[in-house]
Image (cartoon, coloured by chain):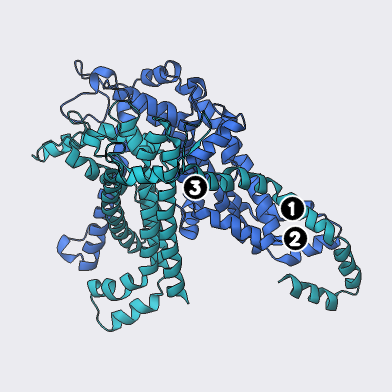
Chain colours: A blue, B cyan
Amino acid sequence: MCDKPMSKMSKFQVKKLFVYLVLSLFVIWTVGPFIWMVSTSLKHYGDIFTPVPQLIPRDKITGQVYVTLENYHYVIEMKGLGRAFLNSLLVTIVVTAFKLFFDSLAAYAFARIRFPGRDFFFFIVISSMMVPGVALLVPRVYITRLLGLYNSLWGLIIPMSMSVFDIFLLRQFFLNIPVELEEASMIDGASRWDIYWRIALPLAKPALALVAITSFTWHWNDLMWPLVILTDAKKYTLPLALALLASGQAPRPHYIMAGATLTVIPIMIIFLIFQRQILEGISITGLK
Amino acid sequence: MRNNSSDLLQVTYPQSKTILRWCQRSRNREWLLGYLFIMPLIVYFILFLLYPTIAAFIYGFTSWNMRTPPVWVGLENYKKLFFDRVAYPYFWHSFTVTLKYVVLAVPTTMSVALVIALLINSIRRMQTFFKVCLYLPVITSAVAVAAIWRWVYDPLYGLLNMVLKALHIQKVNWLGEPAFVIPSLVIIATWSLGSSMLIYLAGLKGIPKQYYEAALIDGVNGWQQFRYITWPLLQPTTFFLLITGFIGSFQVFEIIYVLYGAGGGSIGGPRQSALTYVLYIYNHAFRYYEMGTACAMSFILFIIIVIITIIQFKYVRQTYE
């Protein structure tokens, strides 16, 4: 196709080419800042401030191309980002595990077990989705204090350990599992717990994966809640530590970009592994 | 569904009587089990959803710093917020800033997202590649986004100004000039249009192909196709994005906090030009410890969001019934 002369290309093909060109521009616009971030994080301080943007780290004087990891070393060791990384990892994993278990438990009960007041209670719980989280911030901090969880990692985990939206999502999924499957095993003498644990949960794997990925992304990135709950710098999560690093007055983008790269990379890896599920999930649920 | 299947059981299986009896006997146990399964939710719901909602409402009528017991002041907080320009000089200002941001950011993001969705929908190859790339900013932490853009917007060595210089356009002090603050934030919002794009793409996939085939036979051109088929049929998607976009960007906080707040100095940006409503709530709650006032402001926010949500429900019912 390429060896055909331009004049022989149909109008249709020119159009297609144009579409790809425009989309590529959008991709450059979107991905560019990330590349710039990584590039800056790999430079020495002296080579950051150049009159012309230098994508590849190049020594100002000798003109030699290099890569340095000393900015990473500095923010991890000196600025506490290493510890913050571990704190974030711990909190995110525990919150996600809690959410998967407790949300699916409640969702299963709402979908399958019959008990008085079930639908009424489900309605009440679902209507709480309307309340914006920010509006509940102050009383939530207060009750977290009353529970003795203020300024602790548990204070990040327990108040975030369930999600009404996830319950809603999982309930829909459980409702779509054929009842006959569960009844058959009930005849065989399986208990409700067995059915939930051995039949419903394995069948709901796609929905659980979606819950896990959104929960991981959300809590890994969250700034607001750690900001109001933590005072001790040793307990800071990664976004909080990065916010502190980024807010300094002196221009030190090399450190900030190293910190930003550390924050972004784990999520990007997860995203690239699970991109199919994530992209499909968003299209289905309209999740943001 | 369940009733049907137990009828079915009765017909098909001779031992169905035994099963029914088993069900009867175990009904009480089933109830108990149901409550047991939702027990964590009940505790969580009361502690972290029900109590905070009621408390946010009640504490709005008190003067409270979270350390000493709250003092009842009636409607004082609301009165002061609405009318006392000395005690709360920026209350209405924060509304204006937020509305300006919302009115600019939501339509801009949506229209660019729609254009991209249309482009991606029209190609066969590399769809996933474009989707993945354009979705990256959405999964990025707001703190990292703010940090990255602060560096891109840097007045002297920022990428953007260097590109402008190469194009012989005047340099701009993006984050420092009050007039440019909101547009700069809107650009960041537009940068992360990935989720709107995906939702539009899902909407486009839902339009039956027959319409376009029929239009092709009638000799309709591209613009007419968009104007009379795509756009009207995308209306529910557009409306959904408008509402969720409004609710989401009305609560914008984290990016602005990192760009202007965390330093501790002039929180709210140059001449308070980035003081959005939630940042204002945050300042009063966690900087000045005026929890009562913060609760009153939270409750106002809650009312706004509820009204918008009700409008959405009304509209959705209208379109689908």
**Observer-nearest residue: B167 or B309?**
B309
Q: Where does the image place residue A65, in percent across and percent down from the top left?
A: 27, 22
| Chain to which the residue tagged by mark 3 belongs | B
Could you confirm whether marks 1 and 2 are on the same chain?
Answer: no
Q: CA distance from mark 1 to mark 3?
A: 29 Å
| Residue visible at 40% across and 62% down in the picture | B240
Q: Which mark is residue B57?
A: 3
The foreground one among A144 and A167 is: A144
Q: Which residue is mark 1?
A: B35
- Mark 3 crowd level (few <14, some 14–19, many ≥20, 10 Å Cα): many
- Judged by depth in the image, the label closer to the viewer, 1 or 3, is 3
**In the figure, is residue B131 to the left or right of B223?**
right
Question: Looking at the image, which residue is at 65% across and 51% down?
Answer: A104
Circles 1, 2 touching at the beta carbon (< 8 Å): yes
In the rendered structure, which amino acid carries the disc numbered 2? Phe
Q: Nearer the viewer, mark 2 or mark 3?
A: 3
Q: Which residue is painted at 88% across and 67% down in the image?
A: B19
> Do marks 2 and 3 share a chain?
no
- The residue furthest bottom is B218
Question: Which sits in the foreground, B245 or A145?
Answer: A145
Numbered disc 1: what chain? B
A17 or B202: nearer the eye?
A: B202
